[in-house]
Amino acid sequence: MISFFIFLVLFSIVSGDENARNFNDRASLLTFASRVTSDPGNVLHSWNNSSQLHFCNWTGITCNENRDSVLELDLSGASLHGTISPVISRLTRLTVLDLSRNFFEGGIPKEIGYLSGLKQLSLSSNLLRGRIPFELGFLRGLQYLDMGSNKLEGDIPLGLFCNGSSSLDYVDISNNSISGNIPLNEECDVKELRFLLLWSNKLTGRVPRALANSTKLKWLDFESNFFEGELPFEIVKNLSKLQFVYLSYNRFSGPLERFFSGLTNSPHLQELELAGNRLSGKIPDIIGNLSRSLVQLHLDDNQISGAIPPNISNLLNLTLLNLSSNSLNGTIPKELCQMAKLERLYISNNSLSGEIPLCFGNVSKLGLLDLSKNRLSSSIPDTFSSLSQLRRLLLHNNRFVGTIPTSLAQCVNLEILDLSHNHISGSIPTEFARLSTLKLYLNISYNHLNGPLPSELSKMNMVLAMDLSSNNFSGPIPTQLGSCIALELLNLSRNAFQGQLPSSIGKLPFLETFDVSWNRLSGKIPESFQTSATLKLLNFSFNNFSGNVSFPFLQIDSFLGNPELCSSSVLGMSICKNNTKKHFIPLPVLLTVLGIATLLMFLVPLVFKSKSKRKIVKMFSRRSSMYEEDDERKEQNYPKISHQELMEATGGFKSSSLIGSGRFGQVYKGILKDNTKIAVKVISYVKAEEITASFNKECEVLKNIRHRNLIRIITICSRPDFKALVLPLMQNGSLEDHLYPRGGVIHVNLVQLVSILSDVAEGLVYLHHYAPVKVAHCDLKPSNILLDDDMHAVLSDFGIAKLVKEEVEKFPVAGGVSGSPSASSTDGLLCGSIGYIAPEYGMGRRASSQGDVYSFGVLLLEMVTRKRPTDVFCYENSSLHEWVKTHYPHKLEPIIKQTLLNYPLVTTNATSRNPNLLHDMVLELIELGLICTQNNPSTRPTMLDVAHEIATWKEYLNS
């Protein structure tokens, strides 16, 4: 009886304890939820007091088996707004807390440090500010810590690594504003640490020697900080499990030999990046003893001198070697040809001399070869013809002589060829001119080439940019160049061309930049140049042009040295004289005209009956095509707007209604009878058999796409002879109009730009991740970003230039297309526009969401620097990404200051509280742009990550 009584007492105590825990955990969760100010996904809909649902069944909650305690709280990616409540510490049995990828503001509650059982803490990608609480050092059982991509500042607390525990396995505090040294000493126990990511902070000092005790370390990323001193050779010699080492863009100095000697003890090393430091001395011979697993080696942008050691060829699995922007000299060792797996080789911007080894033709997987900006001489070898994978060949700014090898025509996958700034002579070989696969860029400027241009250049009908300037070409400009329909940039300046300018060039549908200055051209400037809707930059200077011109958007600088030109629209040019004279008609001519008129009076009634019959036949024919149009429109569930209505709305598609041009057509503005303002995109310039299937498929996809940041389709008009999309007219034009206003005065400010960027990112997120069929935009640029009355951005031209399906295992397939991991609806033209095209597209990869991320990164860098990618590409022989990267991270201050001067001053509550806020924001936007434009698509973030990062800034600026 006594034992039974004891049992009842114990049972009541246990029961009471469980009930108390139930009450405490439920109450704590509700208090936590009360600090959430916005829940756009309605994730916490079940979290309420009136809910009959047990709290263990609430979204994001995992409990123990007894269902009386919360073990895991995972609300990652829920887009929650608010602050993190300190009451979280009352979940005493919590082992996992994941609040990553939200919009939590304020500081990290120090009370989290009292969750003694916590093993995993992830607060990354939020708006958290302030210092890292030293109380986090109390978490002696913590294994996984991720606080990356916030706004944290101050030092790293000593107790984070040195708390008497050795449990830490993964630490990520990257992409913050953490400063000071890494607080590691010999008393710290970090022997279980495998991942340490501290990139993109403001850390200083030397890498602590105590890190040598982390013998299990696999991933070490200190990129983009301010570490100094010699590379930590005494540390790496103990780290035999290292696989990835990223120390680029710091202030490390000194020679490489001891560091490489230490790394020879790491047989699993796969990637080593040391770019952008102050490393000096020679590349040591011991480099040949590094891991045979090494696939990428970056030593670029340092002060390394001497010759390239031949035994670097021992790294047989290397796919990427970057030695550019150093002070290397001597010749290119032929031993490099033994690296059979090499795909990308960069040795540009050094002082290398001699010839290109003939054996390069044996490196069969070579897709990119950049030997530019050296002192290489002799002729270009014929052996490149055997490189079937070669897509980018950059030999500019050397001392090559001889002629253009005809064998280059056999490089069937070549897409970028730059032979500019050499001493190449002779004419353009006819065989080379037929290189129809060239899709991006041909630059043979600043050589000694001569003779007439071969008409066969018209075969290059997919190339986007062609620069033939500063040579000795003569004769007429071939009218056949008008067949290069993909051209966006054509530079023929500083030659000896004669004759008239072909009007066919002015009709090129995508041409934006055209320079024909410093030639001997004469006659009138064709009307096609004056009415083009795409041309933005033109230069006709120093020729013998004559007549009247009308270019309202050009200045006199574009016409200098043409004294016979006149205009009433170009400021500074002489006004045309009105030579009006009285003309008398001779009597014989007058009698002839009267006789013809009399004859017509008798013939018209006879012809009328015949025309009436033909008109009836045409009516039936027109009705037939209208029925086809109606059937297709009904299938798509679009409202009916006839071709005739579009003709009336746009004034017959007259030139004054033309407002833009895209890769597959022109855009006209118009007004329907109900006063609806529309934009009509007329599809053209593509073979009918190619466009029909893709147009129908893309319309089917676009029918199902609905998002506030994507252009809405009002209807389609599709007939055998006419295809068009009818869209709402965006009153504020395009982003390009605001970045580069014709008046020169910018009215959009940085806060508005962040909002526009956020809109664009959200639109891409929908296309990549949430649309019924995944679409890659493939032509992201300022002119394709339209702004409504409230300056909200919408993406246009999505799904038209390229419709893709992503990897089959990840996403549903559009239209049953099969084939390679990604496929497109329209093949041929390279995806995108000059300067925005992802490098992998030039290496043969097809359209993908990662390519859009790259284009978005370029767009971001362009908005910050206000440098057109085409200008950087053509005048500085580099991409915008490369240009910014040469200033990162220690030379960015002038760029940031110029950005703040470029845009109108703006004041918000947030900028008033923190005067340096805009400065910090520009810096982070530059860093984000560089991350998005990394050459390797697998290292780029997704648009989900990018959109979140920008949304955090938008949120903070408007808070």
Image (spheres, rainbow, N blue to C red):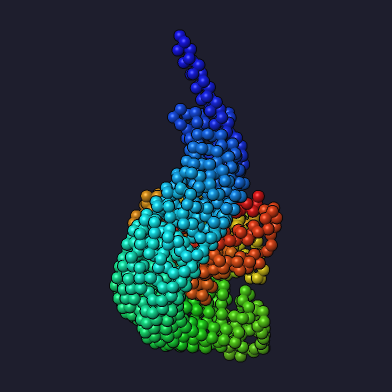
The answer to whether residue 851 is above or below residue 542 is: above
Q: How many marks?
A: 0
Q: Is residue 904 visible?
A: yes
For image coordinates 38% across by 61% down, the residue present is 263
Which quadrant of the figure has residue 485?
A: bottom left
Which quadrant of the figure has residue 356?
A: bottom left
Q: Is residue 509 visible?
A: no
For image coordinates 47% across by 52% down, the residue present is 186
Which quadrant of the figure has residue 953?
A: bottom right
The answer to whether residue 216 is above or below residue 689 is: above
Quarter of the image with the N terminus is: top left
In the rendered image, residue 461, in percent from the top left (x then y), is placed at 42, 72
- Which residue is more in the foreground, 593 or 547? 547
For image coordinates 56% across by 29% down, the residue present is 24
The answer to whether residue 697 is above or below residue 423 is: above
- Which residue is more in the foreground, 80 or 9? 9
For image coordinates 41% across by 59% down, the residue present is 236
The answer to whether residue 551 is above or below residue 730 is: below
- Which residue is more in the foreground, 364 or 596? 364
In the rendered image, residue 566, in percent from the top left (x then y), is placed at 63, 84
